[in-house]
């Protein structure tokens, strides 16, 4: 039987008020996929989610038109830190978040790999490996997605090789995947603005990491130029990446079933809606038909 595909496109939604409200906010602008934090992005700890809120979230999701919900870990987390106190706080916070994802039936938690501070990249990658192995041993049901980074400061994870190192040295390879962020990858030096460079980059990704490990995509333009190693998101078509790259990505059948979420600058949800419409208008007639989307 031929597999049916759907457009999995949306944005990061706030959980302010109640966590179920993220579903309503996403639906209000036509999302079919959303990303959320499961707790405050600025705090280490969080009160447990009540059974009532868990049930309400699951029911809202079930009754919605959303096809995918993924989660993002707090930005303060750094399981590669050489500072033992920060490393432990980060580990404990991630454990809380993995368990919250399991409670909410969210399959993926996106994590920024970490930064080495005043040490070196290899020791940082090794610390990340130790912590991820322990985290996945002590939790169940949720997969960690390592996000490719721009490489700003002492941050690791800005090369395919870094991500492959963490995956290949894991005791739980089946529970580690990758989130590809277009802004981060571009700032890190990966060019995918033409059909030729686009295809070459994904061939490289497949050879080094494995295309089967790609589970989520952040769709962001970049304020800074390629190789700048500066992480500054821009609205679609208003940055240095250009619309052709997003056209190639949105029309690539290899990625039809992978959730794509915006993290572009916004004042309100209307800004996300506007960026989603720009992306949808990049769909070819063939893709429209395959994804059951009517654009024109």
Image (cartoon, rainbow, N blue to C red):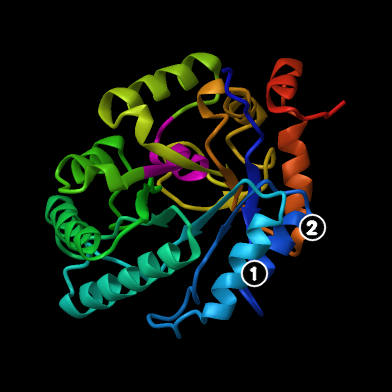
> Residue 174's spot in the image, x, y percent?
27, 42
N-terminal label among 2 and 1: 1
The part of the chain drawn in magenta is 178-190
Left or right, 75 with respect to 80, comes to: right
Please determine whether, in this image, residue 55 is positioned above or below residue 278. Answer: below
> Residue 46's spot in the image, x, y percent?
43, 83
Residue farthest right in this picture: 296
**60 is within the stretch colored magenta:** no
Write down the residue under mark 2.
Answer: 28
Left or right, 66 with respect to 195, comes to: right
Write down the residue under mark 1.
Answer: 20
Please determine whether, in this image, residue 286 is positioned above or below residue 296. Answer: above
- Of helix, strand and loop, which one carries label 1? loop
> Residue 11's spot in the image, x, y percent?
64, 52
> Residue 57's spot in the image, x, y percent?
61, 67
Name the quadrant of the C terminus. Answer: top right
**Residue in view at x 41 percent, y 63 percent:** 102
Depth check, mark 2 against mark 1: the one in front is 1
């Amino acid at each position: 039987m031929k597999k049916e595909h759907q457009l999995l496109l949306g944005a990061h939604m706030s959980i302010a008020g109640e966590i179920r409200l993220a579903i309503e906010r996403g639906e209000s602008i036509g999302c079919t996929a959303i990303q959320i934090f499961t707790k405050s992005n600025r705090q280490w700890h969080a009160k447990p989610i009540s059974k009532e809120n868990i049930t309400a979230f699951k029911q809202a999701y079930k009754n919605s038109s959303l096809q995918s919900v993924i989660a993002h870990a707090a930005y303060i987390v750094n399981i590669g830190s050489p500072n033992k106190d920060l490393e432990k706080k980060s580990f404990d916070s991630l454990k809380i978040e993995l368990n919250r994802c399991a409670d909410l039936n969210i399959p993926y938690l996106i994590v920024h790999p970490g930064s080495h501070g005043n040490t070196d990249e290899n020791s940082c990658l090794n610390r990340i490996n130790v912590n991820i192995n322990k985290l996945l041993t002590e939790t169940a049901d949720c997969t960690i997605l390592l996000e490719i980074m721009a490489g700003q400061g002492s941050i690791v994870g800005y090369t395919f090789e870094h991500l492959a190192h963490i995956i290949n040295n894991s005791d739980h390879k089946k529970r580690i995947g990758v989130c590809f962020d277009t802004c981060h990858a571009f700032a890190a030096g990966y060019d995918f603005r033409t059909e030729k460079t686009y295809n070459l980059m994904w061939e490289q990704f497949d050879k080094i990491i494995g295309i089967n490990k790609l589970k989520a995509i952040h769709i962001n333009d970049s304020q800074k130029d390629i190789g700048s190693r500066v992480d500054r998101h821009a609205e679609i078509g208003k940055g240095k990446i250009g619309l052709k790259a997003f056209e190639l990505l949105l029309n690539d059948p290899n990625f039809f079933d992978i959730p794509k979420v915006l993290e572009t600058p916004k004042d309100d949800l209307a800004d996300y809606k506007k960026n989603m419409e720009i992306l949808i208008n990049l769909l070819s007639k063939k893709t429209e038909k395959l994804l059951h989307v009517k654009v024109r």
